[in-house]
Amino acid sequence: MTTICNFFEESRIYQPGEIIVREGEKNRDLFILSEGVIEVSVKAEKEQIVINEIHPPEILGEISFLNGTPRIATLTARTRVEVYILSYEKVKQEMADIPAWFKLILRTLTARMKSCDQKIKHLETEMKKFKGRQV
């Protein structure tokens, strides 16, 4: 019997300022944050807007992992970071064995999460514009 631990063979260390994942990339790997702090940012107009800060333990990259869409945010190490990587290529066969009805549920949930992220990005941009007018 295969367990999830069998798939997490690789870990990586990132130094402060290093990019772990870039918005728009098509990589489907899943990350488990085990140490450090990660900054989540999105591109809005011509600048990066920080929308979250993530502390361990946390799973990252689940939307791309589950439905294959490009990354919706950039992840940058704020401190020294260690992540464990679950390669999509290693679990592709197990993913193929998931019943079609459950895949539909997963796709629906990840689409809704992505939609929420896009709305947050839009609201952050509008808030910055509004703050600029208040001066």
Image (cartoon, helix red, strand yellow):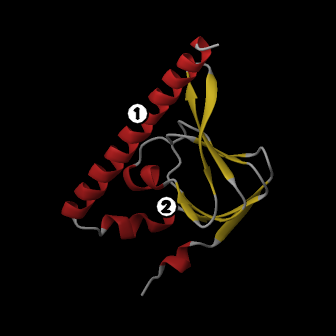
Q: In the structure shown, which secondary structural element does the residue marked by tag 1 occupy?
A: helix
Q: Is residue 75 left or right of residue 91?
A: right
At which x and y percent is residue 122?
45, 27
Question: As shown in the figure, which amino acid type bears the numbered disc 1?
Answer: Lys
Residue labelled with disc 1: 119
Query: As displayed, is residue 69 above or below residue 31?
Result: above
At which x and y percent is residue 52?
58, 45
All told, the count of numbered labels is 2
Task: Answer with mark 2 or mark 1, whichever residue precedes in sequence.
Answer: 2
Q: Is residue 130 left or right of residue 1?
A: right
Q: Tell me which corner region of the image, top left, top right, bottom left or bottom right, holds residue 32.
A: bottom right
Can residue 86 be seen by looking at this rendering? no
Query: As displayed, is residue 114 above or below residue 11?
Result: above
Residue in front for this viewpoint, 66 or 108: 108
The residue depicted at 45 percent of the width and 35 percent of the height is 120
Can residue 24 be seen by looking at this rendering? yes
Residue 5, label in figure = none
Q: Tell me which corner region of the image, top left, top right, bottom left or bottom right, holds residue 100.
A: bottom left
Q: Is residue 39 left or right of residue 14?
A: left
Residue that sits furthest to the front in the current view? 135
Q: In the structure shown, which secondary structural element does the residue marked by tag 2 occupy?
A: helix
Nearest-to-viewer mark from 2 and 1:
1
Q: Are marks 2 and 1 in contact (CB under 8 Å)?
A: no
Residue that sits furthest to the bottom in the current view? 1
Residue 89, label in figure = 2
Question: As shown in the figure, which amino acid type bears the numbered disc 2?
Answer: Glu
Q: Residues within 10 Å of mark 2 (few under 14, many from 20)?
A: few
At which x and y percent is residue 6?
54, 79
The residue depicted at 65 percent of the width and 13 percent of the height is 135
The residue depicted at 43 percent of the width and 51 percent of the height is 63
Q: CA distance from mark 2 to mark 1?
A: 31 Å
The residue depicted at 49 percent of the width and 77 percent of the height is 4
